[in-house]
Amino acid sequence: MAPKEKTAENNAAGVTAEMKTAGAAYDVSCEKLLAMMEERDRGVLRDLGGVTGLAEKLRSDTVRGVSVKSATHGLESRRAAFGPNKFKYPPPKSFFRLMLDAFKDVTVIILSIAAVVSLVIGLAMPEKRAEYGYVEGIAIVLVVVVVVMVQTCIDFSKERKFRQLNSVKDNYDVMVTRDGENIAVVAEEVVVGDVVKISAGDKLAADGVLIEGANLKTNESAMTGEVIDISKTHEKDPFVISGTSVSEGVGHVLIVAVGERSQWGLILKGLIVEPEDTPLQERLDKLAMNIGKIGIIMAVLTFTVSMIRWIVHSADVGHWDGEEVLTFFIDAVTIVVVAIPEGLPLAITLGLAFAMRKMMQDSNLVRRLEACETMGSATQLNADKTGTLTQNRMTVVQAYLCGTDFVYEGAGDEIAKQVEKLGDEKLSSDARALIAQSIAVNTQANLQKKDDGTVDHLGSKTECALLQLVENWGLDYNKLRTDSPPAKIYLFNSAKKRMSTTTDLGNDVHRLHCKGAPEIVIKLCTSELSLDGKTTRAISEADHEAVVGKVNEMASQGLRTLLLCYRDLPGAAARDWEEAPETEMTFVGVLGIKDPIRPETRDAVLMLKQAGVIVRMVTGDNPLTAKFIAHEAGILDGSEGPNALLEGPVFRKMSSEEKRAVALDIRVLARSSPTDKLVLVRQHKALGEVVSVTGDGTNDAPALKEADVGFALGLAGTEIAKEACDIVILDDNIQSMAKAVLWGRNVYTSIRKFLQFQLVVNVVAVTLNFISACAGVPLPLGAVPLLWVNMIMDSMGALALATEPPRMSLMERKPFGRVAPLINRGMFRNIIGMSIYQLIVSLVLQFAGHKIFNIDCFPAKFGSNPEDLCYGRTLQQNSMIFNVFVFMQIFNEVNSRRIEEKNVFSELHRSHIFIGIIIITIGVQVAIMLGVGITRVGEKIGIVEITGPMWGAAIVLGALTLPLGFLIRLVPLDWCFGPNDDDVTEMSKIEKLLHFPQRKAPEFEAEDVEEDTTDDMGSDSVEKNVARSVGETVAVGELADDGVKKGGSVMSKSRRLVKLRVYVHAVAFVNVVQRSTTSQQLRIKDVPGASP
């Protein structure tokens, strides 16, 4: 199928049968118009009879426009045939719909079923009601409600804020001609066939074809990303694109595509795709599989030992009780459930929610919650130059006026060091007045001041830079134009490369102002204006060469140059020059203009580089300009290799292997197309990098969507860029991205800290379960005490450790990347060391606690279990163990604040939420022991009064975790188990000594990236490549078909993971039933930890 036919077919997908039926009233189909605009095909336009013939086929007229009164070809008929000029955004989800989505989570469903079963059994059976068996069911319901409501509120809030930010401003007026009359209509009311009048500053509301124009140019930076004005003529490019703006001239266009069928709408429509798994999600999947395997191994061992005991015992007594085998199986199942880090989903949700709220204060609107943590793993940042690193507005940064060099703010360090002081104070007021008048009258651009203090540039960006200089001098260019109106204008001529304007000075004297290309206009000058602004001096050929040298110097620094000169013409009233008398001119000076980098760019880039993030500039600029901008921004510092600066056409012609070989070496990709950026992102991802991309234009949308994290600019960014991104930078400040990296690393570190905290409890619980099952004794913790322990592990621990503020030291380490383990060697050391201590304490107190504290045998105070005369001692011993266990977790929570740092109290004063939660936890524990322990209810749930020495032991044994944690951190990492962050394959000395198998580095299979053989990306093909690239992004994002092509490896791994999760959830469900039916067995609150 030919490319044009394929494009037309793809576009036709947006044309409904009703539209085709209504379109029969016209002689050209919607599909054909879409294909013409998609390809910028002048051949199709010519076949349709040009713009006049096309207007006739659309039942319109290039002069009179559409007929509103026509019964068959009126406005409604056109909307029915070609669609309205509106884009139908997906309706925002309601609060209840978001709640339903959160409830569809597999973990939440399993918990809900478990809660119902636990409540039914706990309430239906009298003996369970007496033992408060329904408490655990209520607790599970509360957990479900909290998780669902937190997730729903987060999603609802961020969706509402984004819709407010990204609401399309379609309430501006458009001048159209209908029935021969010029009227103003709202942009949404424009229809196909309308004749629209456009002029400088107008935003194009729909796609159209040029009817006529005078010096018409459009700024298509929204599509191309570069500040390049595109001339619109019948011969070169008669197509105007929706979403772009008019920079110069006036004209009339015939509208041929609107709304979702316009180029703007087609691109926007293709950006709704399902997000891929983040690096953290991938690590959690791996963690779930590994923990599941360990849990299954421990469960098999437990079941095997129990069966051996049962066989031996049954053989001795001669009685074989089959129900005990079922009990052994349920005990084994409990092992698997206890192994799962139950509070992890809540910890992640709380951590991401806290980070999102704080990032909003740093002007980062997070559209996708997972982007918070993904940014902490980012290793590559591919930044768009225009609008991201630079200010996206041309500015005068250097000048050579009246024989003197001047440098202005924004010039950069290389240029600024040429002068002692920035500014032009040496320039006299007379000289400024003359220069300002020359600029004001000899330009056609305008500056539009907005209510928020910002200034919009209307017209030529170069001329706007000159007008801004006049405004910076405190002069009003509009007043100068009014005081000295142009007498005659000689518009810019590409052959002469200059523009001139005459003004009347009075006394029959006119002044001719001229600006243009320095190397040409300087030859017309015979004198030079002095600093006083009044006198002149003659200049020679040598002076001409000196000026040209200045121009070349500016050009070598990436500046666009423009020369100003003038000439006074006496006796002007008697003359009428057909050609401007541009001879014997007085040279005023040369202005150096560029799009300066943002003041904060360099510091932000250096901060990111220090954090180990490779910052790369991707731009459409020529290599010379790009190189200087990169040096100014700190991206290039001279230490890079030979492939640091590469041009898009060269990169495009490389094979996939060659691209992959240089992808990580590139620091500046100049003269690049939107497809180049997209291919570069895919190559980085294929190499296992975590890629972030910044951009503000429509051309950035494909790469923004493909990247792991896409940043769009909130102020300068287009609606399409913001729709495609993960995070919107509200203040367009690149430093906000550095803050996003900091918060992302803080989220990841917080999750690690929580895992370090909870896995200690899980390891102890699993081991105690195993030992208790083998010894044939129940655990000392009942349902309610264990529920409180779980609350400390889950909710309180997650809230405390996930809400700690970030530390700047996080920016001094390398990024986590895609291969760093979720549990590293330092965490393994801390978890194993602390688990051994807690396990020893728990076992000693369980088997010898009554001897250590001299607890005599006595019955329960309120008569519970009267058959057991020592039941009171059992309850007190269990209460003591419960209290010790809780205080060990409280103090270990402080220990878990740091992983490798020895001082766990550093910056504790900044963690107000953490301190508050620790105080609340201690207060609640004391209240439970002192308040509930003296009641009949306390005796029923297994909590009674304990003695003073027991309180002292609980506090001392808990506090000992702090010095013990310090000692554990003194153990060298090289004598510990587990992978390192920097190199997961590196084996420690102890692992080598014990002959552990060599760890393998994760493999990333190279993806086949579609080659783009286009050497040059002209303005007439940029938008179609953007649209095509968006389509490619959608195809990649829908079902990860790259993974399917790789022999199904990704899919097979996913199926294995799903099977494991199903098994874990199933055993968790069985465990809940078992806990509710067997009062004497271990009661453990079940919150499966593998997040889907």
Image: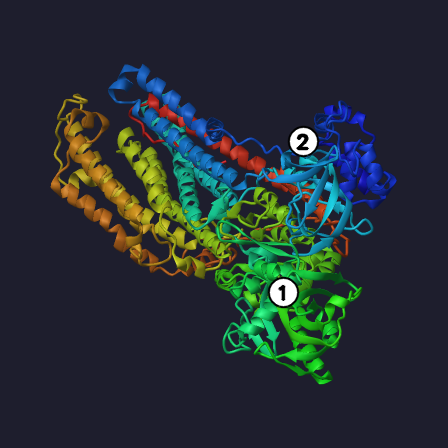
Q: Nearer the viewer, residue 1069 or 370?
A: 370
Neighbor class of circle 2 (other Cα within 10 Å; few <14, some 14-19, many 20+) is many
Q: Name the image quarter holding residue 206.
A: top right
Q: Secondary structure at mark 1?
A: helix
Q: Is residue 802 left or right of residue 80?
A: left
**At which x and y percent is residue 66?**
75, 32
Front residue of 982 and 973: 982
Query: Foreground mark, 2 or 1?
Result: 1
Name the amino acid type tagged 2. Pro
Q: Amino acid at mark 1?
A: Ile
Q: Residues at badges 2 and 1 in contact (C-beta under 8 Å)?
A: no
Q: Percent x, y for residue 274? A: 59, 37
The residue lying toward the viewer, choosing from 710 and 278, is: 710
Front one among 1050 and 500: 500
Query: Label 2, on which residue?
Result: 84
Q: Is residue 824 above or below residue 541?
A: above
Considering only vertical position in the picture, is 896 above or below 933? below
